[in-house]
Image (tube, rainbow, N blue to C red):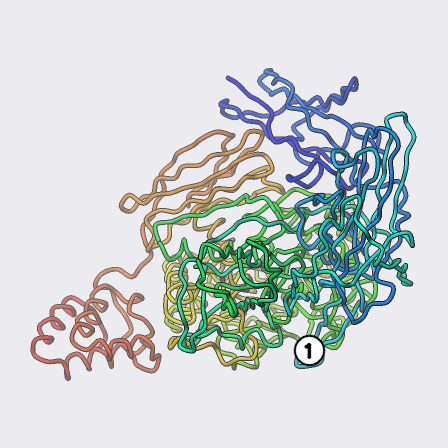
Amino acid sequence: MSARVERLRAELRDDSAVVATPRPRLSWTVVTDETGWRQAAAEVRSGAEEVRLDGDGSVLVDWPFPPLAAGESRDVSVRVTAESGTTTDWSETLAVEPGFVGAWTAEPVGLAEPAREAQPALLRRSFTLDRPVRRARLFYSALGAAEVEVNGSPVDDGVLAPGWTSYKDRLIHETVDVTSRIRRGENVIGAWLAGAWFTEKYGFQGFAKRVYGDQPALLAQLEIEYADGDSLTIVTDESWLATGDGPVVDSGIYAGEHYDARRFPAGWSEPGFDAGAWTAVTVIDAVVPVPEARIAPPVRRTEELAVRESWRSPSGALLLDFGQNLVGRLRIRVSGPAGTEIALKHAEVLENGELALRPLRLAAATDTYVLAGKHEEVWEPRFTFHGFRYVQIDGWPGELDPAAVTAVVLSSDNTRTGWFSSSHELLDRLHENVVWGMRGNFLSLPTDCPQRDERLGWTGDVQVFSPTASFLYDVDGFLASWLRDLALEQAHTKGLVPLVVPSVLDAMETGAVAAWGDAATVVPWVVYQRFGDVGVLRDQYPSMRAWVDAVLGETDGDGLWADRMQLGDWLDPSAPPDKPQQAKVDADIVATAYLARSLRIVSDAAAVLGDRDDSVRYSELADRSRDAFVAEYVTANGRMMSDAPTAYALALELDLVTDPAVRQRLSDRLADLVRANGYRIGTGFVGTPLVTDALTGGGHLYAASRLLLQTENPSWLYPVTHGATTVWERWDSLLEDGSVNPGEMTSFNHYALGAVADWLHRVVAGLAPAEPGYRKLRIAPRPLPGLDHAEARHDTPYGPASVAWRREGDTAVVTAEVPPNTTAVVDLGGEPFEVGSGRHEWTMDAASDEPAFGGPFDLDSPLSSVMDEPRAYRALLDAVGKHDPDRLATLRRDPVWTRGQTVRFALLFAPPALSDEVEQALSGVTSRD
């Protein structure tokens, strides 16, 4: 048997060995063909130091050496010994480099006399070195966004660096080794600078305002170590020069970018450039937090897409289709006369053959480029991004070759870790839509949408989506970074969590809001459960506790959270287009359910962290809220006071009802409601991630499958059948006639309703963590009627895991891969059992719970869909449909019609040719009619 150590990394990033802490935790995986492989001990080596660590720890293992000092670097390798006694070779060496500085002395600098607000600028600083350099490291940040060059070359591939944080409390800095770019003699540091998120105006309905500042600023610190041991530090201060007359004339996140190539000063960031017309910068007079090292991957260009199709719209406009709703911008190659101006307008969908611009609201989403008149010019905006599939190009000189335009996809560069596939083409497209939606909205921070005048870190969206995100990508560092901002914002609101983080909507902050503020507890707990990251739990625990304490302060002490302003089950499909908070479920039910959930999470987190007193206290408070919820909202016969799907899903999936018999009645009632609604969605942001779990947990796989695979509006697959390539904000963002939903708030790239993907991974395919960080897996597939096979694959912190099943009659063959150094609990519908690592195969019962052929059915119950009926009745409707498809379509949609009425229609009004089919279809059907 062979084994080797792979994927050694330090702290939370795959894309860099640069760490943000003096004590970076180490993680590694093992590849072996030995079944049931378990680690008994590990040895960690750095130089002459070797440390033995007994036990099976291999994920986020504490740093075993003295803390790293600023400027220090260590080479680390690992070898492990199995319980069987075999020892691996030493792993490949990992260079661990601190991303932090010893002392930050750089000051924020910008234009001394800007001509207008949010004016982009170019900055430069020349310096001379008189001896060889051993190492040079550049640390830079910005109030806004910057791209830094040294001697004419970009220092990194980051985009919109350093990203958006809660600027008043937190800045992050980039860390770049620029040794190879520095030389003896004259050198130049140059920076492109724009306002980006820092100078953007935030707010809705014409009340937008600047929250942070009017002008961008740069902070940079270059640390040089000479070969002879001396050092030199160059920082942003009054010695730098700047100009506001560069080619980036204007730039905004919402507006887009205006670039005039005629204004480009060739050689501006290289030695020998004449900067006589440039002026000295000014040091910004503001309290600026000391920048901290980056813990999440930066935004990068992650993919490029070619034009799928080009044509002229009814108005004559030149339109391009990239075949995918994406987040990014265009790169163009163009030749033409100097002064020619090209405008690039972006939109997600078309309406009446033209760009649908109304959903963008006040976001112009337009980039303009003025040609310098050279042979061929290549341009891509620097400091903006757009959500789009379609682009209108105005002013292009001559005929456009579609190959001259490329869509550049932008996203925080998180590592992909999760995949799902099935026998259902539309379902697989839905899953990819979820992935694309996440990619576009996980850009610097988790946003709600990427296209209109919003793009904010709505807490409710990421709260419901964080389990899905944590399967699809390694987002430990990404979410940990955002959670730091959340905690800092809480410090200004006495524990309350803003609706958006960073907080830029003061006018909308009206107190604690359930499901949105609960991101403070749910997201850290998800990170802990999915990545085994106790560090995030420890760092966020004060924030978690502050949130529930703040909510408790708004209650009457009876365990209920009621009579407060709430967003409730936002975007319930029954709500009016411009009143998305008017859901079927009472908002107080949502509030108390989330209070009980968050109290339980805080109790469990305290237990993990060893705080027994807090664990007991918050457990008692959670019990009180749970009991109050049941007493107030659950009837003795297993009905919810709000007879709406979300109410039942909350009671079941947040474990608020514990009596097995009552739970089954609740699940049965939920299945009835789903059936009565034609297996169409009846939930909003809060209920949607829970409803399928609540159905399958109660044994209603058929109802869950019908709900999942429904294509009528509203449903998950309705947008797919209308060409969606991302998840929509509304179930009907695009109406059946092709027009855009008339609601003021309509996005075609919102990941929240895609949170159902987590259920696809955990339940449909059957792959989930049974212990934090997948230390133990749960393998529990539930083959859905309507699917012939399904598979989920996930790169866990311990290595690749997978579960797949394929249907063979009324059984399913299940195959699974369990990573080394883990075990799995397997639940195939009978008594659960445990297995060790390796590849496994079993069979399980996969019979459908679909109503049997000829079984009884209630002719007086509402007719809401065809496929929920016994096969004989379905045959009847199919027969009707062959002769009168319009009537059948009406019957499917109209809940007022009953099955009995449909039968009578078929018997009384059908032509003779149909009567025989009807009679045959009804043969053997039992009924009380």
In the displayed structure, would residue 274 be above or below residue 589?
above
> Percent from the top left, x then y, of residue 453?
63, 71
Determine which quarter of the picture holds residue 520. Answer: bottom right
Q: What element carries label 1?
A: loop
Mark 1 = which residue? Answer: 565
**Image position, residue 192 (x, y; %):** 74, 55
Res 555 → quadrant: bottom right
Residue beneath the point at 73% across and 35% down: 25
- Nearer to us in this view, 619 or 728: 728
Determine the residue positioned at 66% across, 75% down.
566
**What's the amino acid at mark 1?**
Met
- Between 177 and 677, the residue placed more toward the observer is 177
In this view, the residue in front, 51 or 861, is 51
Q: Is residue 487 left or right of residue 353?
A: right
Give the image location of residue 705, x and y in percent: 38, 59
Q: Crowdedness of circle 1 by 10 Å Cα count: few (<14), some, many (20+)?
A: some
In this rendering, position of residue 271 left or right of residue 461: right
Q: Is residue 909 left or right of residue 799?
A: left
The percent coordinates of residue 280 (x first, y second) are: 89, 58
Residue 347 seen anywhere in this rendered image of the structure: no
